[in-house]
Image (cartoon, rainbow, N blue to C red):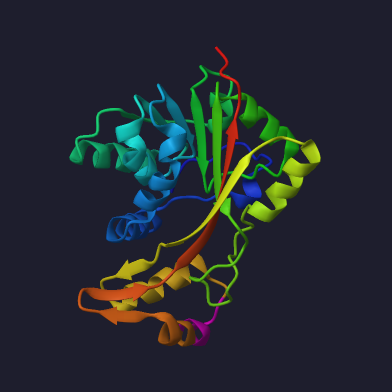
Amino acid sequence: MCPGRKKGAWDAVRFQWSSESIRWYREAAEYGDFHRNIAKLLRTCVEGADSLCDLGCGLGYLDAELSPWVARIEALDICREAVISLGNMAKARKIRNIFPVCGDWEARLDGERPQIALLSFFGNLNDERQFRRVYAFPRSTLIYITNTDRKSNLSPSGISRREKACGEQFSALLERLDIPYISRRAELEFGQPFASRGDAEAFVEYYYPGCTAAERKEFLCSRLEQRDDGYYLPNQKSLEIFIFYKEEEQ
């Protein structure tokens, strides 16, 4: 398991990596084009930037897709195992401009300011104090990618058990604060492949421990697809990208 930190305003939505979740996420990321498709949506926002800091980068697959367009990417996560995984992936792909860092994102906000700051399915900027801190961090651009709602196609109940940050709530905060932004919505496939049905059952039990064995069986019977290379759990993911352009600050 990953090291903990002091309890903060975002703990309700905080995700903790484990060896199992790292493996499943890596397999999903490498099976499809989810991160490549997000990167295409962000290209015009990041192309030519001298520096980008990804707060809560996880395994860094989005950073890998953005790396051709940014001079330097600092990928920060508190989970050492995730940071090591990112370093190994970058080395295997011969990506030399990603610099993985194991550390606390809140402390990083007081350090050197990048041109662009990125938060991808991380944090809850509905907290006004946290939003203002993050907004002030980059010199020119803040990018925040979040779920449009709490629905989950991978859950037997249809709802994520985590209190996910949602675009609808965030939009309401921005309107109240009268802060200009650009918003883009997308529906992108980000399903989960499995080598066996047993692995699929372990996945559902791991992420949704509250459901019964009967509920897991019914869910997998209705949703799990058998393919030539194993099994696949489809997941059309709804996301919203918020982009904040500020006047370049030195």
Residue 83 x/y as whole percent:
37, 38
Q: Nearer the viewer, residue 124 or 212?
A: 124
Q: Residue furthest top?
A: 250
Please state if 16 lies on the left or on the right of 246 as rendered. Answer: left
Q: Position of residue 39 (x, y in %)?
A: 39, 45
- Main SS, magenta region, reads helix
Whether residue 133 sits left or right of residue 83 in the image: it is: right
Which stretch appears magenta?
211-216
- Residue 116 placement, left or right of 126: left
137 left or right of 233 in image: right
Residue at 38% across, 50% down: 35
Q: Is residue 88 above or below residue 172?
A: above
Pick the residue in front: 193 or 186: 186
Q: Is residue 76 visible?
A: no
Residue 106 percent across, percent down from the top left: 59, 30
**Picture coordinates of residue 244, whole percent (x, y):** 60, 34
Q: Quadrant of residue 99?
A: top left
Q: Quadrant of residue 109?
A: top right
Instruction: Say above or below: 227 vs 55.
Output: below
State the count of labels: 0
| Vertical comparison of 208 with 53: above or below | below
Q: Is residue 118 above or below residue 197?
A: above
Q: Tell me if residue 230 is in the magenta stretch.
A: no
Q: Residue at x 36, y 29 (%)?
A: 70
Q: Quadrant of the C terminus?
A: top right
Q: Is residue 49 visible?
A: yes
Is 123 in front, or is 52?
52
